[in-house]
Amino acid sequence: MHINVKQIAAAATFAVLAQPVLAEDVALSLISQAPGSSWYSYGSTFGEIISASDGDFNIAVEVLPRGGGMTNPVAASQGVADLAFASANAAVWARDGIGEDFEGRKSEDIRAVVGGLQIAHSTIAARKAYVESTGKDTLEAMMAGPDYPTIVMKPQGSQVPIMADYMFEAMGSGLEDMRDKGAITQISTAQIAQMLRDGTADVYIENSPVGQATMTEVTLTTDMVFIPFPQEVLDHMTALGAPAGPMPAGSYPGQDGDYVNPTSATILIANKDVSADVIYQVTKALVEQRDAIAEAYPALADWDPQAGAQPDQAVIELHEGAARYYRERGWIE
């Protein structure tokens, strides 16, 4: 019998090529917040989308039910988590090691995956009655004294006091200085609306997405005026990862025009050492399921993945895997 060696070799080669290429198993952890929070809910959906994604990897995502805006950048930088939700401004503070929470310990190993998921707005709202009785309709006038308004905001642990400190810093003051002048009252959100209603507070500083419950209650139960931000504050906050942007007219009662303010986006970040090929697949999966994400979470309905890839929304350096995907889409150079 004549054996055709070439045919046997060709057949063997075909058999090898015909075998399905097995995707590599990869486990990723995603730190969010405690159950019941929006970030935990987002994490569950993002994890499902990533785990179901097509590509070279079978990715299994574990959502860590802990963390927060100030701790997640550190967790991602230290490799405690591979992926993390973070506030854009806090990511900048952590990366650069600035502010009380991060001073002396830079978290330089974080990179952006998707930006601009949900925009929070910094707002300064004053009781209309206070403005009319004092004539103080600017932040400069309110900070000039000698009679200072009672400014209410959330207690320590929130980003709001930190944001306020940076705002005052841009005007040559600071949170401690304003506190020493008797102008600052930090209370729970449950008390803020009541104090403004009964006139024991004059000004409310907040950082939240449009529709946040406390701001909605305040503006529905008390006539409020939105106080404009001085340009030096907007410039300072932009440098600190909170770029200026508009809160659309009519977002709240008493807000007739677009309100230009420091904004802070929720972003998804990763440790820089996570494989670029893995992050490419993660980015592709999330962007291409944008409509499904928006349908599941109306708060994310305004997410524009192309805008989120830009420096003003991604804020920190893009992960090389995410950057590769965005370049393929023609969204970045």
Image (spheres, rainbow, N blue to C red):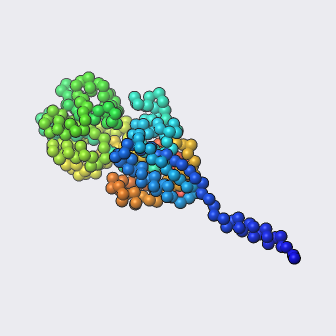
Asked whether 113 or 65 is in front, the reply is: 65
Outermost residue, top direction?
180
Q: Residue at x 66, y 65 (%)?
A: 19
- Position of the N terminus, as image quadrant, is bottom right
Q: Position of residue 54 (x, y in %)?
A: 53, 60
Residue at 28% across, 35% down: 154
Whether residue 28 is situated above or below residue 145 in the rendered picture:
below
| Horizontal relation, residue 273 to residue 19: left or right | left
Above or below: residue 291 compared with residue 235: below
Q: Residue at x 83, y 70 (%)?
A: 5
Number of marks in the rendered image:
0
Res. 13 visible in picture: yes
Q: Is residue 111 visible?
A: no
Residue 117 image point, x, y percent: 39, 50
Work out which residue is located at the far bottom of the displayed protein and give it.
Answer: 1
Residue 242 shown left or right of residue 201 in the figure: right
Q: Residue at x 20, y 28 (%)?
A: 148
Vertical relation: 86 (above or below) 288:
above
Return the x and y of residue 231 as percentages of the image width and height.
32, 38
**Residue 93, placed above or below residue 260:** above
Q: Residue furthest right?
A: 1
Residue closer to the observer: 47 or 138 = 47
- Residue 150 location (% of width, % of height): 20, 31
